Amino acid sequence: FMCVSNLHEPQPDDHVKRIALFSRDAIQAANATFVDEDDESLGHIDLRVGFHSGPCVANVVGSKNPRYCLFGDTVNMASRMESNSEKNRIHMSEPSAQLLQKQAPELPLISRGKIKIKGKGKLETYFLDAPGVTPGSTQAQADREGSTQPSVRFALSPAAAEKAIDSLNKQAELAE
């Protein structure tokens, strides 16, 4: 799953904050959802989240089955942040962390130090220390190869974020 913020309408003051809060809410909603309601012993749904901030190109591709697509290094970096994240953690690049500290200084970040990112080398990255989100184990990425764990890569328009949050809230209400 991927979503984008600040794509169609500029939101220079809070787009990264919206992504961070949406990420936290998405993990909380997933963690409150059983993998199989008939067999609670299977546990809850876990997410791995990552995001990056930067420019991208968007366009409709195809004529028989047109699709709205995003292209560029920002999309690839968001994917790398997600794939190098951990279960129930919100992982971000240094540019996103810097923007988040300006837009929401009350949201605490944890430096991961420099980690190897495929195709990028060693980069400084951060986790959002999100209240209400229980981080998973700290397995190495190599241990997660072949994992079927759901993942989320963010880049989100505010309208899409609000619709997604409304949808998650409705699902939580139905579950109760």
Image (spheres, helix red, strand yellow):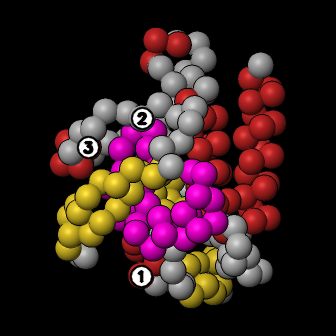
Q: Which residue is mark 1?
A: 73
The quarter holding residue 173 reads top right
Amino acid under label 2?
Answer: Pro
Residue 99 painted magenta: yes
Above or below 64: residue 14: above
Q: Quadrant of the image for the C terminus?
A: top right
Residue plotted at (80% across, 26% down)? 174
Picture coordinates of residue 159 (x, y %)?
Answer: 79, 64
Quote the CA–CA distance across marks 3 and 1. 24 Å
Amino acid under label 3?
Answer: Arg
| Label 2: element kind | loop
Residue plotted at (53% across, 34% down)? 133
Residue plotted at (63% across, 87% down)? 59
**Over which residues does the magenta segment extend?**
80-107
Q: Which residue is mark 3?
A: 144
Quote the CA–CA distance across marks 3 and 2. 15 Å
Which residue occupies the foreground of this view, 109 or 166? 109
User: Does residue 19 appear in the picture of this structure?
Assistant: no
Which of pointers 3 and 2 indicates the residue nearer the eye? 2
Above or below 21: residue 176: above
Q: Which residue is mark 2?
A: 135
The quarter holding residue 162 reads bottom right
For disc 3, the neighbor class at 10 Å (few under 14, some 14 to 19, many from 20) is some
| Label 1: element kind | helix
